[in-house]
Image (cartoon, grey):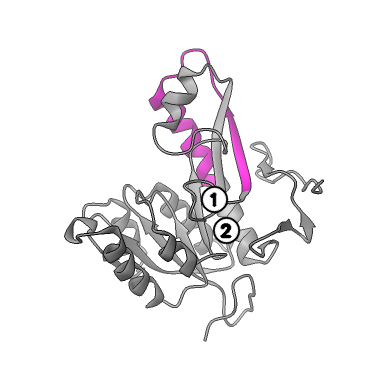
């Protein structure tokens, strides 16, 4: 039996399952952070909905079990999500980490893992939910952009935001150059958030999001210079 999410002992570090669809750069950052002891947890499985996902190579290189559930083989989202949930449960995870997993999950699936599933999104939520976030930020004349890590709820990119990383937009940015800058920030942001949830510093009861016991009135902000986060601001 695994410990409850957020509870960690030397003998039973939290177990992470990471879901991917593509290159897996955030998966690579998480693997490195776990191996270096930055995250006090183990990645026990990687699941992809695409057989050609490059991130599967990271799992193989580091001896992490992986499997593919090709969503194209399923007649409905519900059928795919049912098998995906079964595959995840087979690893007995404490946390489910979405790292570039490009699927809209059904409410039933989300409810099954509520409070222990995280996602990273390439925008400063609640701005720019969904796709093409970099091009949309440029089209709107934004001066900054970034990434957010949030708990997953049935509302697309709408769960409580834990922490964000901000990056400037410069005059000659394209969607590609901005995406690259945001991705570098993501590789610092996601390990930091996963570290905090695994150590119990971040807690969400389904009603109140807390950092070190203090309700958050706004997302934590990653300091790009120190790689630490600003202190929580009390709610209200």
Residue 95: x %, y % from top left: 51, 67
Indicate whether residue 185 is drawn in magenta.
Answer: yes
Q: Secondary structure at mark 2?
A: helix
Q: Secondary structure at mark 1?
A: helix
Residue 59: x %, y % from top left: 34, 62
**Can you name the residue that lies furthest to the top here?**
171
Residue 70: x %, y % from top left: 22, 59
Q: Describe residue 57's horizontal placement relative to residue 225 as left or right.
A: left
Q: Describe residue 127's horizontal placement relative to residue 84 as left or right.
A: right
**Tag count:** 2
Mark 2 in CB contact with mark 1 (< 8 angstroms) = yes
Residue designated by label 1: 190
Compared to residue 220, the image places residue 177 above or below, namely above
Foreground of the two, 24 or 220: 220
Foreground of the two, 213 or 13: 213
Identify which residue is drawn at 79% across, 45% down. Answer: 233
Identify which residue is drawn at 56% across, 48% down. Answer: 149
Tell me if mark 2 has few (under 14), some (14-19) or many (20+) residues whose alpha carbon lies within 10 angstroms of its own.
many
| Stretch of the chain drawn in magenta | 162-188
Residue designated by label 2: 194
Indicate whether residue 13 is drawn in magenta.
Answer: no
Dividing the picture into quadrants, the one containing residue 9 is: bottom right
């Amino acid at each position: 039996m695994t410990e409850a999410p957020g509870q960690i002992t030397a003998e039973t570090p939290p177990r992470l399952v990471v879901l991917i669809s593509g290159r897996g750069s955030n998966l690579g950052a998480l693997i490195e952070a776990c191996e270096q002891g930055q995250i006090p947890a183990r990645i026990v499985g990687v699941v992809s909905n695409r057989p050609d996902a490059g991130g599967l190579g990271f799992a193989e290189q580091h001896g992490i079990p992986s499997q593919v559930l090709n969503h194209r083989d399923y007649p409905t989202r519900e059928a795919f999500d049912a098998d995906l949930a079964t595959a995840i449960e087979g690893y007995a995870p404490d946390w489910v980490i979405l790292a570039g997993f490009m699927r809209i999950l059904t409410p039933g699936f989300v409810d099954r893992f509520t409070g222990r599933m995280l996602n990273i999104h390439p925008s400063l939520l609640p701005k720019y939910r969904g796709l093409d976030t970099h091009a949309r930020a440029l089209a709107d004349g934004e001066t900054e952009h970034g990434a957010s890590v949030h708990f997953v709820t049935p509302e697309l990119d709408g769960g409580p935001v834990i922490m964000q990383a901000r990056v400037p937009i410069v005059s000659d940015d394209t969607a590609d150059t901005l995406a690259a800058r945001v991705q570098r920030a993501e590789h610092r942001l996601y390990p930091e958030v996963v570290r905090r949830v695994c150590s119990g510093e971040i807690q969400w009861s389904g009603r109140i999001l807390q950092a070190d016991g203090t309700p958050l009135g706004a997302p934590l902000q990653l300091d790009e210079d120190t790689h630490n986060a600003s202190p929580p601001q009390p709610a209200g």
